[in-house]
Image: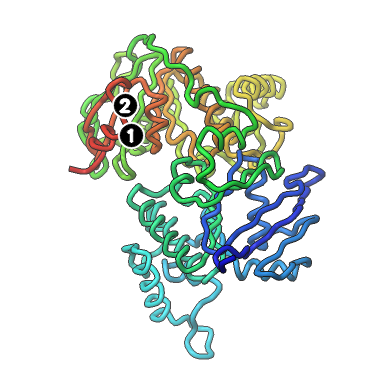
Amino acid sequence: MSQKQNYILEVQNLSKNFSGVKALDQVQLKIREGEVHALMGENGAGKSTLMKILAGMLTPDSGEIVFEGTPLHSHRDLKILSAGIAMIHQEMLLVPELTVAQNIFLGKEIRRGKTWWLDDRSLNQKATELLAQVGIALDARTLMKNLSVAEMQMVEIVKAISKNAKIIIMDEPTSAISDKEVKSLFNIIADLKARGVAIIYISHKMDEIFQIADTITVLRDGKYIQTKPAAELNQDSLISLMVGRELDTMFPEHTEAKGNVLLSVQGLGRQGKFSDINFEVSAGEVLGIAGLMGAGRTEIARAIYGLDAIDTGNIFIRGQKATIKSPQDAIKNRIGYVSEDRKAVGLVLGMSVKENITLASIKKHKRGLFVDDASERTAVANMIEALRIKTPHPDQPVKNLSGGNQQKVVIAKVLLSSPEIIILDEPTRGIDVGAKFEIYKLVKDLAAQGMAVIMISSELPEILGMSDRILIMAEGKQTAILRKTEATQEIIMQYAMPQ
């Protein structure tokens, strides 16, 4: 057997319990040098717990880990893992007030001689070399808080590479970066493979998995299901392994029935963000908005919801001109908005499921100065049942829910404000295939109930599968509105590319 076939990491019968709940149950995983090993499973399958153990952040209850031929048993031994394995977290662990260079070398700073003073010149030089090595055009002296989310993600990747780790865990690394940056990332991964570095790759994007993975391991409900070469699987067979059942079709049945126009925008513009935007959405319709990162999709949504001011144009609700200068104005006009960043904007992670769901509509459940607990709990119970939110009880902290169920809580909160128009910005980002299917069905149900739905997504199959019509953006300009029957991925990309 060649050296490249050697297992650098072997996990056998690993188990981990949290308060009596088995997060991992007899899990196994074998990683070879220089391979991309995709770890797949729905949210709650145990992927994050396993990765935190491999990164030295958690200690398993039982099982064996062998790293580079050495069995690891004690918590002290697990520190060997943290030295040899770098993890790029989905929730970025960066310090906004420090520079790019200081973040890359955080914890392994270069100092002036034997003093405690940082050698910023050397830090900046080495960081610049690393950034150039992976083709990222960033000034190492820039403060992190001044970067875009995509740029922060690329810095996180460089930070992991700087540790010279034998294994790099990438958890949803492309969730917030553009197609061009994804291509750069894949080039980086190919270079790391050539150097013998193993990549454990976690993503809900099937096209990525089949593009770069050599091997795929599937977990389900904390249990090991199967490991197979990626070439022996396809999307349908992989989904079946992940969810334990066949999904007849990824997207719910399409319906054509439409009602009156509920939202119309004419000549909408915001300086430096977008200009001359014109579209309308009818009751019962799903309007998809497609475009590359930075095209202005989210900015339009924020302007309609009153989060950002518009400089030109008008918004009409049910044919009447509306003045929307704040989210309160939007809610009064029966507009709901689900942000692309559910954890930063949509949820209060320290609060319960119940408190999050009623956060924006708590006045409806007040009796005088006090909240009517019975009324609040009834409303929450109805939402949990209607949206099939998986939670042990309404008082469960929302941070303990899976990504898909957190997203349903955000949508439930918005629905309690009784919107007729709902804007969903990347509603399935970072959630598993089973939860995506449930969100898709929910969106179609909302449209069937007579809502006008605007759905922004970076995933073209999602846009094509869910939309009645598709608005395409490029560099802040509207380039086309296509009917579902007119659109293909290739046609959308032609309109989305800068001219």
Q: In the rendered view, does 217 fall on the left or right side of 95?
A: right
In the image, residue 435 sits, relative to residue 34, either above or below, namely: above
Position of the N terminus, as image quadrant, is: bottom right
Residue beneath disc 2: 470
**Residue 103 shows up from this direction:** no
Residue 22 image position (x, y, % from top left): 77, 44
Q: Earlier in the sequence, mark 1 or mark 2?
A: 1
Residue beneath disc 1: 290
Mark 1–mark 2 contact, CB under 8 Å?
A: yes
* Residue nearer the viewer, 193 or 342: 193
Residue 285 image position (x, y, % from top left): 38, 17
Query: To which quarter of the image does residue 493 belong?
Result: top left
Farthest left residue in view: 499
Mark on residue 102? none
SS type, badge 2: strand
Residue 383 image position (x, y, % from top left): 62, 22
Cα distance in 3D space between marks 1 and 2: 7 Å
Q: Residue at x 52, y 71 (%)?
A: 163
**Residue 3 shows up from this direction:** yes
Q: Residue at x 52, y 55 (%)?
A: 36
SS type, badge 1: strand
- Number of numbered labels in the structure image: 2
Q: Amino acid at mark 2?
A: Ile
In the image, residue 491 sits, relative to residue 50, either above or below, namely: above
Farthest bottom residue in view: 114
Q: Amino acid at mark 1?
A: Ala
